[in-house]
Amino acid sequence: MSLQFIIAITEHRNLGYILAPYLVEKKNQNTFFSVVKKVHTHNLEDGDYTYSPIEEKLVKLIEKYSNESLLGRFASRGSLSDFFKNIELDTFTKRVVPYIEKQILKCLELLKEAPIPLYRKESKYSNLYEEDLVGLCYRDTSAIFNFERLEHETRYYLTIRYHNKEIALKHRNVILLTNHPCRLLYQGKLYFFDNLSGNKLLPFFEKNYVSIPRSVEDKYYRTFVLSTIRHHQVQAKGFDIVEGNPDKKAILSLEEDQRGNARLMLIFRYNQRDFPYTDKEMQAVYLRKQNENYIFHKFGRDKSWEKNCLKLLRTLGLVKTSDGLHPEGISETSNSSYFYSLINWLNMHQQELEEAGIELEQHNLDRQYYTGGHMLDIEISDESDWFDIYAYVHFGDYRFPFVRLKKNILNGVREFQLPNGEIAILPEEWFARYRDIFTLSETEAEHLKLRKHHFPVLENNLKGINKKYLQKFKQLTTEQPETPEVPPKLNAMLRAYQEEGFGWMYHLHQHHFGGCLADDMGLGKTVQTLALLVKTQRKINGYPTLFDPVGEQNSAQNRQFARNHQPASLIVLPASLVHNWEDEILKFAPTLKYYKYIGARRRHKINMLEIIHQYDVILTTYGTVRNDREFLKQHQFYYLILDEGQYIKNSGSKTYRAINDQNASHRLVLTGTPIENSLSDLWSQINFLNRGLLGSLAWFKREFISPIERKNDAEAQKKLQHLIQPFILRRTKEQVARDLPPLSELVRYVDMAPAQKKAYEAEKSSIRNNILSNIEEIGLEKSAFVVLQGLIRLRQLANHPAMIEENRHMESGKFNDILRMLSILVAEKHKILIFSSFVRQLKLLAKEFEKNSWNYSLLTGQTRDRKTVIDNFQQNPDNSIFLISLKAGGVGLNLTSADYVFIIDPWWNPAAEMQAVNRAHRIGQDKNVFVYRFITEGTIEEKIQKLKEKKSSLAGKFINTNNPFQSVSKDELMHLFED
């Protein structure tokens, strides 16, 4: 027995004509097939026949409209008979029938490619004959819609053809297998009409044509005939169908959609008929009625041209979505900034769009916006201290000074009304690019004046600058300017990095900019500065005094003298460094005549003008300038140099104001720690050097301090670094390590003595409760004094209980450990620097040293003759120990005879500790230096150390280290007092 798989067209009593799969066989010499069984998915595995993959697929598709499948898909409950009895006609017609036809059409597509026979099978017969075989006719089929307009009516009929042969339908045995698209069974052939709905054929099964009376023809022509001409082949009589090449243009429309969201929509306009690019309709038909004649104009869209238009927009950065075109990379499309970005995109690409023939239109907007191009013309003139910036903005035919947009730029307002009423949208990049220029410059008439020290802002932000000025900026911003010759009168061999520092300062001097030399302590800032002063030393010494006779000849000589003369440079120092500068001048720059303007009788019987013109350098102190502010500001100095410039970090202090009041041609700051506590320290010093470089303090706080210190804003950090980079030079000891011996740093943890630990824990509990109570009552900020008082008391207990009177008989674990280490180092002839924040602790150590007969020196704020104390330690081989208070001896000391540094009570500020270390580890040191930080374990010292490491990133980015105490939260603070 040979079985064969076939598909049959059968009639279902409820569903009409459908497809069904069967296994058939031809017995003996029979000329017909007999049906063996109907195939279902559940009997595919019976084993009586091996099904091919396509045959299995056909069975599964047909199974989708089995009675059981339809019941499960379209009815939630009930029997099959109930389903067909109760289903609404509308549901059956609109949902069930299309679903079944979808499966049938899929099956027919498979039959087009597979050698599986299709039969017409009557339900009451089980045999299939050769004449029941159905042929598939899916090529060269067509349908022609015929309209004939007569005097009283219009006749409409449909002609279908196969191989150009007409198929007559009237009174024929025709079966519609599917409606849309139409699959028509007629005389043993199944015809495929892909663009035709079968229901359009139904009238012509019974009649030759459909008649439309003249009275309703107008509506008929405007609806049915128009739609038919658009989608089908039409033959017309009594009216015209004109086909041809229409006028076409591409329109890019700025508009709001139905939800009120902005978008760009590409529209293709053919003979005044608009097609959005999303419209899939490829044929266009419109009707014009002339003198009772109907004329239909039909044309097809130019798909190749439309594709090229879209391709161009894609290259310009627009991407297609279902609801419009959007600039690439923008996800949020419902806010005003997106609308502005669309307009700016149009501004930017207006010329390319115009060249491509794409026109711009606006629809459904409440105002008219400017969508043309814009341009900014910039010219700069170079004055002595200023750049004059002449900038003009162009919006189409309108040209006006850029300064008119100042309020918009500073206030972030992007809309600007043009004289014709159109709204121009300022490009977003203008706000980032020019905001700082408007902030830092002054407006004069219709141009801007910008101080020369703001050239980093100018260089980065203004396009269209004359090449002459670009060259000037390049010269100003050269990171490594050509190093000038070191003056032969300098009695020092500068190391490579010192030559670089000297060259950098001289480079700023030539361009009249102030600079901050912020090298680590111990790298020779003083000798680099002396090299600069010798290099710029006046060529003529002496100056006529007030008591010299004044005659015509003398006056002429004086005028000539003044042209070649420069006043003295004023160097402002902490009092402790005056003798150090004296020594350095005598040693390295003996040709510089210096004068000390210090002491209670400093103004007694002196002529300051004469001093200024007889000497090269005047040494004074911060306190002196503060007290003699009005007197000194009457005079002009050549250089105003601040050593330890952090002394003016508080811009609200009298010292800062007094220093800032002084007059000098050049300014210089020397410091190892330009930032000790906050970025405001930096502002004070930079503002002294180059007035206004960082704007006002309020602006600086808003633009930099708040974003950087509170939010760690990377962009703000980058911007600030760019502004200050040309005016600050900092080298760390690590960077010039080849010039210094090794530095070893160790943290030494020690235990408290038993009684000390008990006292500490009791005090900690009491302080913690007191602080919590204060914070709850008045807040963290107002509790600062109570917090600091508690912290100091715990520090004292952690170091030596005897610093608190009631514990004067207790021992200290740290104190004993320090004495043990010292006994070894003293015996080995090492020299040791011991730094402490507490003078009382230093005195406790001094008492023990005297008991052990150890020679030592002591330097505190009360020490009068600092030089003698320092020289005794440096030069006396039997003096092994130098006790120094951190505040009094953290700066200005050169103690290279020491090779050990003890920091016995480390605290918040790592910068202060590094200053202490640098007393020994500096240029001139020829021994390895060992630094020990003593921390009492389990105390506030240990917790501060961890918190300090966690929070010390700010100054590393902006020149130095910082004080993290300002940024401690309540939780972090209370953690210090926990077990």
Image (cartoon, rainbow, N blue to C red):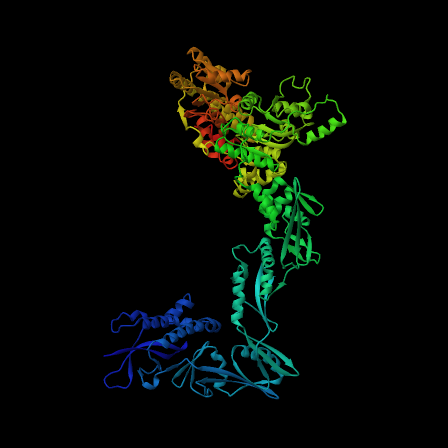
Q: Where is residue 678 in the image (x, y as percent from the top left)?
A: 55, 33
Q: Is residue 631 above or below residue 20?
A: above
161 or 269, which lies in front?
Answer: 269
- Looking at the image, can residue 403 be seen? yes
Q: In which quarter of the image is the N terminus?
A: bottom left
234 or 402, which lies in front?
Answer: 402
- Looking at the image, can residue 803 be seen? no
747 or 480, which lies in front?
Answer: 480
Taking the image as shown, residue 946 lies to the left or right of residue 58, namely right
Taking the image as shown, residue 270 lies to the left or right of residue 830, namely right
Rendered residue at 47%/82% (across/down): 142
Total numbered labels placed on residues in the image: 0
Q: Where is residue 641 in the image (x, y as percent from the top left)?
A: 60, 29
Q: Where is residue 732 in the image (x, y as percent from the top left)?
A: 48, 33
Q: Where is residue 35 in the image (x, y as percent from the top left)?
A: 29, 80
Q: Quadrant of the C terminus?
A: top left
Q: In which quarter of the image is residue 7?
A: bottom left
Q: Is residue 898 above or below residue 958?
A: above
